[in-house]
Amino acid sequence: MFMLPLPRWIAIVGARLRQGVRVRAIRTADGDALAALLLSLSARTCYLRYLSRRTFDTTSAQAEAQQIIRRSRGGIVLVAYAPSNPATLLGLVELVVDPDNPQTAEIALVVRDAHQGQRIGTLLARQALYLAERLGITMLRASTFAKNIALRELLDRLGRAAPVGYEDGVLELLVTIKSPDLRLNWVA
């Protein structure tokens, strides 16, 4: 299994945004908070994130939270939270490294409905790319609905997004990551 050389380092690092949002690596103890985030997602947000008509009940949210935590061992999973309420996760980004091509990672992102449009997704993605760059990841693969303009625009800001496939309304994109400094305000 691909193991990151940075987990201890990123666990103590946060990122600040004007709204006071911080980003950190996911922790094993985040299972309940992550399940609560998944339970809070609207049917539309679940549809856009999972590309299917999926919603969560308590059992399925707990199971998905544990899957996400397990996937963090083979990639980068970061969560956003407000310092005033660190137990409530606002969003998460996953980068799962392709075992056959370690320079490529699959990206998945979700932000709590009430906090969408506040650039939390951008913050999460940019912080993940900052770490990915240090691991030699140069390409991202993303699957999204063609009509998900917000995610497509975000991917365009992160690099050059090129369509590589399309089926049943789902667009497969390959993003060449921009090299300029992606760092935001890192704090210990």
Image: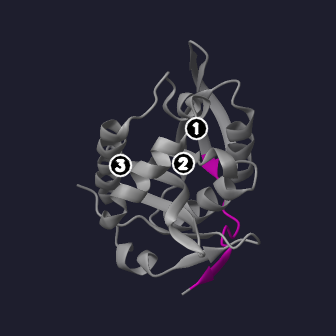
Q: Secondary structure at mark 2?
A: strand
Q: Nearer the viewer, mark 2 or mark 3?
A: 3
Membership of 178 in magenta stretch: yes
Q: Residue at x 66, y 34 (%)?
A: 162
| Residue 128 against residue 162 in the figure, above or below | below
Q: Residues within 10 Å of mark 2 (few under 14, many from 20)?
A: many
| Residue 112 against residue 181 in the figure, above or below | above
The residues colored magenta run: 176-187
Q: Secondary structure at mark 3?
A: helix
- Residue at the spot of label 2: 139
Query: For the residue marked with disc 2, what is the amino acid?
Result: Met
- In the foreground, 19 or 92: 19
Query: For the residue marked with disc 1, what is the amino acid?
Result: Leu
Please say if the residues under marks 2 and 3 sit with CB atoms less than 8 Å apart: no
Membership of 177 in magenta stretch: yes
Q: Secondary structure at mark 1?
A: strand
Q: Residue at x 55, y 77 (%)?
A: 14
Choose top left, top right, bottom left or bottom right for residue 178: bottom right
- In the foreground, 90 or 51: 90
